[in-house]
Amino acid sequence: MPTDYGPLSVWGVVVALGLATFGIRASFIYLFGRIDDVPERVTGALRFVPPAVFAALAVPSFVAPGGAVAVVGNERLLAGIVAGAVAWYVDDVFATIFAGMAALWLLRFGL
């Protein structure tokens, strides 16, 4: 993608953002290295970080596969709902993947 910014500006932004990301991560390592006992409230909140990140990465591909929100005729959303229901009741990763892929295949190609 062409831009009006020069290569020095682009690389400056890349390096600055890399340093900022490293600084944020290093600050948590430093902070938790100096604190002997992490408060229960912080530990409880950190339990929800991985599911929140996964949802932020996965949900847009279900809800808006073509870039716009599509509910009617969206086989990915229906297969995701099937997989979510299987995961809720069975609590087995392989069964969830199989059910979701089978539902997507049946919705796309039929019998």
Image: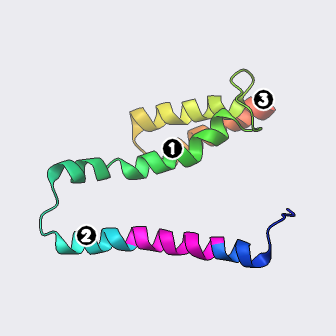
Circle 2 residues within 10 Å: few <14, some 14–19, many ≥20: few
Circle 3 crowding by C-alpha within 10 Å: few under 14, some 14–19, many from 20: few
Where 84 sits versus 18, above or below?
above
Magenta stretch: includes residue 98: no
Per the model, the C-alpha gap separating discs 1 and 3 is 28 Å
N-terminal of the pair, mark 2 or mark 3, is 2
State the residue in front, 50 or 105: 50
The x and y percentages for residue 79 are 63, 33
| Disc ID at residue 25 | none
Q: What residue did someone put label 1 on?
A: 55
Percent across and percent down for residue 45 are 28, 48
Which one is in front in this view, the residue at disc 1 or the one at disc 3? Answer: 1
Q: Which residues are magenta?
A: 13-25
Residue named by callout 3: 110
Quadrant hosting residue 102 = top right
Which SS class for mark 2?
A: helix
Residue 31 is marked as 2
Q: Dot 3 lies on which element?
A: loop
Q: Residue at x 57, y 73 (%)?
A: 16
